[in-house]
Amino acid sequence: MMSDSTNSFELILFGAAGDLSLRKLIPSLYCLHLDQRIHPEGRIIAVARRDYERSDFLDIVKKALVKHLNKDLFNEETWTSFSKRLSYAQMDITDPSSYDTTLKHFLNRPEAAKIFYLATHSDMYGTICQHLYSHQMLTGDARVVLEKPIGMDYQSAVNVCKEVDKYCNEEQIYRIDHYLGKETVQNLLALRFANSIFEHQWNQRYIDHIQITIAETLGVEQRAGFYESAGAMRDMMQNHLLQLLCMVAMEPPAQLDAESIRDEKVKVLKALKPIVGDQINANVVRGQYQEGSQHGQPTLAYRQEPGVNPHSDTETFVAMKVEIDNWRWAGTPFYLRTGKRLPDRACEIVIQFKEVPHSVFELQNPASMANKLIFRLQPDDGIKLQLCEKRIGKGMSVKPVLLNLTAEHARKDRAPDAYERLLSDAIEGNPTLFLREDELLTAWQWIDPILSAWKQSGSRPEFYHGGIWGPAASTLLLARDGRLWQENH
């Protein structure tokens, strides 16, 4: 395969020894190298505080690749060539002098685009950008990629943005949400805006409701330190689920450029109906997993996990009923949920259409027979359409059938990982799938009243056993509207 990239680059990865870098970022860069989708002279400078020799760091990276990549992707020949791209810079990112004495030593190609990837806590973004700026490293077309979450509430997000804005202009900043890099999310736009059969029915007249689910089977794992201060609302709902909601609900952009798409997403966020006061208890469910069982194996309660406060009130599950106050979606509920220690790992968007006005067929359960368009983002990407057909045999009873809208070749080809797509876009200077500052802050502004109410009221999450689909209140959230969660994953 010929390289998609014409740009030579130097990608400086801060936090290179962290879990995200070793589990996602470096494996994605390896896959871009494997597929020859980045410039052959592109270089990766891994930055971390730990005092490794380059050979020691390469051993760590190799073990991470073997662990996190599919077996058919890793081979010694590719590793040998990929490792030549990698350098290791041991430095204290809070020490201004280290940028001159250490980092500048590695940046020896003036013609190469500089991409600074900040896989650190957002509290460090302003400090890093300040030192990069003061050492003249943010000149020209240099870019800064910021990992989520940016801030822990609206005000802290504003503070982080103000600090970064002192040293970078908006065109240089790439705020990442890796769910937007998933192939099926991009295909959602194509399916909507390239097919009149869907776009004409994409509104409150024909759609009964929309469900968006991100379910994880794992518990908090090694992230207790971060998760205790974040919880499911900050970690998943404020960014991933709201971004997926925007992609589903946005109006057709004037054209497929970054600003047009981001303009429409901001309009959706601004049209979200506020959830405040008594509406919080009515429309938001907060849960925390207890002991349970998955695949026949016992699982710990969240409060028993290493590093977790044994009296913690941090939520590991959130479900919400959300409405959008505009002409297209008025009265159409969006049900969002995310949680840990659930029965299946899944990320799914379910568009459920309204029932026919009068059915001439005997339907045992009209809701289960409704037409549904299902976008599945993980663990396997795909799009399916549920229709009704006649059962074989006597009579005229009908049954649901799923049509697979994913092309056969797409199922056979390896779909690039979301981080592969976004890293490639950052290297190429394409900001379309990254968040603009007003997107980020508008989302926080909408979420903030819920977080504040939880804190002020001292409310506690409802417990649910590991291995089930969250607390009972989540089921009731839909049941009171005569609806059910899609759970036949």
Image (cartoon, rainbow, N blue to C red):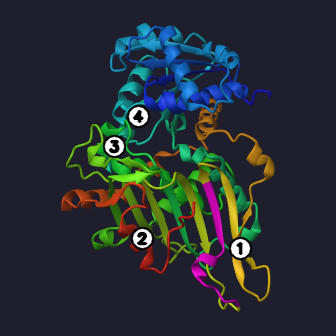
In which image quadrant can residue 52 be found? top left
Residue 413's disc number: none
Quarter of the N terminus within the rendering: top right
At horizontal 58% and vertical 47% (from top left) the residue drawn is: 180
Q: Which mark is residue 387?
A: 1
Q: Decide: is 231 above or below 419.
A: below
> Which region is colored magenta?
361-376
* Mark before the other along the chain sequence, 3 or 2: 3
Question: Would you call the spot at circle 4 few (<14 residues within 10 Å), some (14-19), or many (20 or more)?
Answer: many
Mark 2 or 4: the one toward you: 2
| Nearer to me, 216 or 21 | 216
Q: Nearer the viewer, mark 3 or mark 4?
A: 3
Q: Which residue matches tag 3?
A: 227
Query: Which is more toward the observer, 120 or 464?
Result: 464
Picture quadrant where residue 84 is located: top right
**Amino acid type for the residue under numbered disc 2:** Thr
Query: Who comes first in sequence, dot 2 or dot 1?
Result: 1
Which of the marked residues, 1 or 4, is nearer the chain's N terminus?
4
For label 2, the residue is 475
